[in-house]
Image: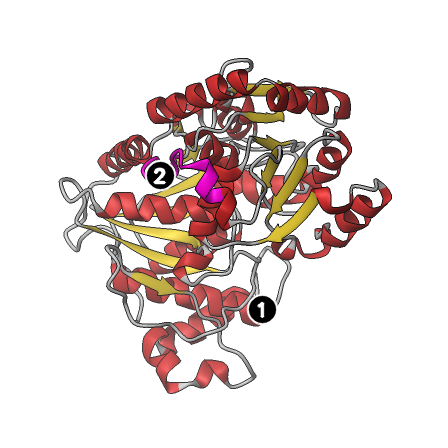
Amino acid sequence: MLVALIGPLPPALGGSTPGGVASHQAHLAAGLAQRSDVLEGVVLLGTNVRALAPATAWCPPMSDRPYPLLRSYVPTGPLGFARPGYLGRVGPGRLLRYMRAVRAWPQPGSRREVLGQLLWYAHFLDRVRPDVIHVQHPLERHLFVRAVTRLEGVSAPVVVTAHSFFGEHPAATIDGLMAPNLRIADAVIAVSPHIAEQATQLGAEPARVWTIRSGVDTARFQPRERTAARQALSIAADARMVLFVGNLEPRKQVDVLLQALPSTATLAIIGSGESAGADDQTTYLQGLVDRLDLGERVRFVGRVPDEALLQWYAAADVFALPSSSEAQGIAALEAMACGLPVVASAVGGLLGTIDDGHTGYLVPPGDVAALGDRLQRLLDDRACAARLGHAARAAVLARFSWPQAVAATVEVYRAVCATRPRSAAGAGHVRGTA
């Protein structure tokens, strides 16, 4: 099988999308690239996370990564579509056909950007000719794939991974875009039983829904020496530190964490609100720190390089994730893999990630008193914290490793390919003018 992955790219791969979905795709690509026993290869098309947002650079050449990488490109300016290099890739005949098709585009947005995305998706599929197309999230990217496979007669089955639904997306987006995409996909991969249940509620056939938990790189995320990490980060050896990692957006409920912070503890906040757009809560949270008179006990660190993130996990005493909704909580899994006890909201995929009282604690979302009580308990009882942290690491090794997730994903590919026999011309070939 040759697999085409389509989704956002994390900053480490030159993309602009921090967060769990982009990280998930990067790890999946790397894991699939190692499965030469069943896969011919994997090629990744990275797209900007913002719907219909143009990429900022021309497509770079295929890289020397274990999987080839192709960046999405949308022409800018009124004459951008007439660039010889662009027309040479997408084809002038295809340009005219797609200009007609875009007139009936079902979603709001710039027609120029829709046209550019569709043409580049067609170019990508024509260049790769995959046996399986795997899209991250049933949003606009999946809609582009649906349109191109219909216009070009592509026979490759389409798999979509669902990362989140209710609580993270507007009702109009779920009903008008995500649900139709789920119903038409050959297979739906849900990152937790919670998401699988919601996918079936939205119309996906239960027989086509597979639950595959996202993995964690347990070789990279592992317990490290605490004293050295604190010295590198200029953190006092006797400080009692709570850690949060995530985007500064409303559903993460960092304001609840600030109100629950024990009086003897410090809080390090890793992440920013840049990707949240109008929902960026950075300024609001900084103001709340002042109003709560938390002073220097709260440190807004912002986004950090990968190696620095590992040091923050090593330096912390406890990890907090007080979100109002989480499909799975990748940051919580990373912290658990590093041997940290986690205190998180009892919502969504976190219910199946954290074993309350064994690998961490679950509290009602928005409950300041309960969150503060569990944090205080772990900060006061270092033996309990160590016991939960050890159990958390063991749970990740047993249930959330990337080799397990990749192997299960390959089984999905095998299943959908079995229902789509290869044509004489080869599965997935685009029949349009390239």
Residue receiving disc 1: 111
Of residue 378 and residue 125, the one placed in the foreground of this image is: 378
**SS class of the residue under badge 2?**
loop
Residue 147 position within the rendered picture, expressed as x and y whole percent measured from the top left: 45, 56
Q: Single out the residue that lies furthest toward the top.
A: 357
Is residue 278 covered in magenta? no
What main secondary structure does the magenta stretch of the protein show?
A: loop
Q: Amino acid at mark 2?
A: Asp
Q: CA distance from mark 1 to mark 2?
A: 40 Å
Name the residue at 34% across, 22% down: 398
- Crowding at dot 2, Cα within 10 Å, few <14 / some 14-19 / many 20+, comes out as some
From this view, report whether residue 342 is shown above or below residue 157: above
The image quadrant that residue 411 belongs to is top left
Locate the N terminus by quadrant.
top left
Residue 424 position within the rendered picture, expressed as x and y whole percent measured from the top left: 14, 52
**SS class of the residue under badge 1?**
helix
Q: In the figure, is residue 215 to the left or right of 165?
A: left
Tag of residue 78:
none
First-in-chain label (1 vs 2)? 1
Nearer the viewer's eye, disc 1 or disc 2? 2
From this view, report whether residue 18 is shown above or below residue 87: above
Name the residue at 63% across, 45% down: 269
Can residue 184 be seen here? The reply is no
Highlighted magenta segment, given as a residue range: 215-229
Of residue 33 and residue 427, the one placed in the foreground of this image is: 33
Name the residue at 53% across, 21% down: 385
From this view, report whether residue 173 is shown above or below residue 325: below
Residue receiving disc 2: 217
